[in-house]
Image: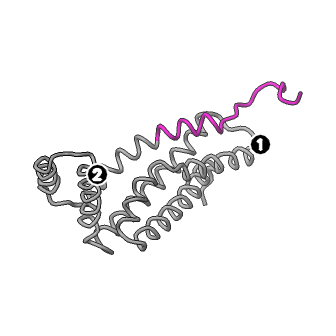
Amino acid sequence: SMKNPIQAAALRYGVIAGIIWTVLTFGAWAMGVSALAGFSMVGAFVPVIIGLFIYGGIELKKSQGGFLTFKNALQFAFLAYVVFELINAVVTYLLYNVIDPSLTAQLLETTLSKMESFMEKSGVPAGDIEKAMEKATAEEPKTNLKNIFMGLGFALIWSFVKSLIIAVIIRKEPQPNFDQL
């Protein structure tokens, strides 16, 4: 029962994005730690969510008579990202702390062994590899609330940047009727 169509659309697309990401995350997790590690790396660069939010913004613009100011476009995109990132943070917390508490350590192990074999192939001396591994395993890995909260902060800053790009793409300011030519 949101009266504001921009907020309503942002909530709808943010939730859809959250559901898609959750399904992909659990799918990768079900395939094993190395699939999840790969998804975490690739997922950061695949613009699925940007595409979804551009589509949502275009739909919103149509529902508003074909116009959407830059400010409203930005508001839509950023709110959608906030909803998405909050869902993502909750799912991350549940997956790493409730559903599979050993996951952080497993992911670290997988990442480190990939790093180790990369260094071996690159001809890094064994002593240096050993030192690097000791340094990397010195701290106990945690995916705790503090880390998730910091991650959320960085994600929101980055999401704002992406929202600016989306707003530039989807905005259409009302203007004199030169468009009908």
In the image, 169 versus 125, the foreground residue is: 125
Q: Is residue 173 magenta?
A: yes
Asked if residue 55 is positioned above or below residue 98 in the image, the reply reads above
The percent position of residue 147, horizontal first and vertical second, equals 26, 54
Task: Write down the residue under mark 2.
Answer: 118
Residue at figure coordinates x 36%, y 63% from the top left: 92
Disc sitting over residue 165 in the figure: none
Q: What type is the residue that disc 2 sits on? A: Phe
Q: Residues within 10 Å of mark 2 (few under 14, many from 20)?
A: few
Q: Is residue 3 magenta?
A: no
Q: Which residues are magenta?
A: 160-181
Residue at figure coordinates x 50%, y 68% from the top left: 23
Asked if residue 28 is positioned above or below residue 159 in the image, the reply reads below
Query: Left or right of 138: which side holds 48?
Result: right
Cα–Cα span, label 1 and label 2:
55 Å
Q: Is residue 144 visible?
A: no
Q: Residues within 10 Å of mark 1 (few under 14, many from 20)?
A: few
In the image, 49 versus 42, the foreground residue is: 42
Q: What type is the residue that disc 1 sits on? A: Gly
The percent position of residue 161, horizontal first and vertical second, equals 47, 37
Question: Considering the image in quadrants, where does the N terminus appear?
Answer: bottom right
Please give the count of numbered marks on the rendered protein.
2
Question: Considering the image in quadrants, where does the C terminus appear?
Answer: top right
